[in-house]
């Protein structure tokens, strides 16, 4: 059986606190070979670091999510993100990016400042980035074009058009897809997925969110990527084993595992 590499999870979420140790065994029993545990704030990155130290099939990334950027986010916060990024199990800066969906989020200019500062950190440390883009594709593309050839990484939980996906692939980015591809209204995601070269495709949960069908609405975990891989295989005319093998290889290459 091919192993799963979940390229984007949040096992540092409180949703996993009550049964975390049992869940790790469940993942092993269901062919999960490796997971990327993502930071979204200083606190979440700190917890992801601690969890990765105590799990032999987990790495983590250190970063501040756009919705966790605040007006008082300061130099000390970025300094701690950098310090954690030097840990041997930190394999990326993330998750970082732009999110214009919520009216109560910090202003776009502050988000851009945080995004650029963390992209610069990734260049400095020669680490890949894990990028979140929601309703901010144009601004994200404009920023990322300035780093062409200097940055590598993944656009996680891709929600843009096939055309914007092509642009990002041309810049060298991997593209990650979640359980959303199994939803009935997934046409846009599936169209984008089909323009991604097989060696640039990643699968992810974004757990505890984004559970695929038939688990939609429940707490998600990495074992549910069997359903995601099967859907992608059906769409691409491949076997589930081919999808699991290739996406594992892709994630291991990107994150230097």
Image: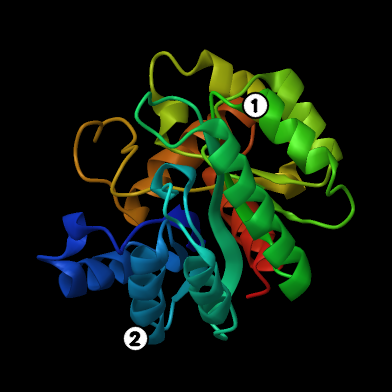
SS category of the residue bearing label 1: helix
Q: Which mark is residue 137?
A: 1
Q: Foreground residue, 201 or 101?
A: 101
Circle 1 crowding by C-alpha within 10 Å: few under 14, some 14–19, many from 20: many
Disc number lying in front (1 or 2): 1
**Residue 157 rendering spot, x and y as whole percentages:** 51, 38
Q: Foreground residue, 151 or 102?
A: 102
**Residue 48 rendering spot, x and y as whole percentages:** 38, 71
The answer to whether residue 194 is above or below residue 29 is above
Residue found at x 38% / y 23% = 103
* Disc 1 to disc 2, C-alpha distance: 36 Å
The answer to whether residue 5 is above or below residue 102 is below
- Residue 194 seen anywhere in this rendered image of the structure: no
Circle 2 crowding by C-alpha within 10 Å: few under 14, some 14–19, many from 20: few
Q: Which mark is residue 63?
A: none
The answer to whether residue 208 is above or below residue 54 is above
Which residue of the protein is positioned furthest toward the left in this rendering? 18
Q: Is residue 20 left or right of residue 229?
A: left
Residue found at x 34% / y 35% = 212
**Residue 154 rendering spot, x and y as whole percentages:** 65, 49
Mark 2, residue position: 54
SS category of the residue bearing label 2: loop
Q: Image quadrant for the C terminus?
A: bottom right
Q: Is residue 65 left or right of residue 121?
A: left
**Residue 196 rendering spot, x and y as whole percentages:** 73, 34
Q: Foreground residue, 113 or 137?
A: 113
In this picture the colour scheme is rainbow
Q: How many marks?
A: 2
């Amino acid at each position: 059986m091919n192993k799963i590499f979940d390229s984007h999870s949040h096992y540092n979420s409180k949703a996993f606190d009550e049964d975390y140790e049992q869940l790790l065994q469940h993942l092993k029993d269901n062919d999960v070979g490796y997971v990327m545990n993502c930071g979204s704030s200083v606190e979440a990155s700190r917890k992801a670091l601690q969890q990765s130290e105590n799990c032999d099939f987990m790495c983590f990334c250190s970063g501040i999510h756009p919705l966790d950027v605040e007006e008082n986010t300061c130099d000390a916060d970025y300094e701690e993100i950098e310090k954690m990024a030097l840990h041997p199990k930190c394999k990326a800066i993330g998750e970082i990016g732009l999110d214009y969906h919520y009216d109560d989020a910090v202003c776009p200019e502050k988000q851009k400042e945080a995004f650029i500062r963390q992209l610069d950190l990734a260049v400095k440390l020669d680490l890949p980035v894990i990028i979140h883009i929601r309703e901010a594709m144009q601004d994200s593309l404009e920023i990322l074009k300035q780093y062409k050839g200097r940055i590598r990484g993944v656009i996680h939980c891709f929600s843009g058009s096939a055309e914007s996906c092509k642009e990002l692939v041309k810049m060298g980015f991997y593209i990650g897809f979640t359980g959303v591809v199994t939803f009935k209204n997934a046409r846009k995601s599936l169209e984008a997925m089909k323009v991604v070269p097989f060696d640039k495709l990643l699968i992810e949960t974004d757990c505890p969110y984004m559970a695929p069908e038939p688990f939609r609405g429940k707490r998600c975990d990495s074992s549910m990527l069997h359903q995601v891989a099967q859907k992608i295989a059906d769409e691409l005319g491949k076997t589930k084993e081919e999808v699991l093998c290739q996406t594992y290889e892709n994630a291991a290459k990107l994150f230097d595992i």
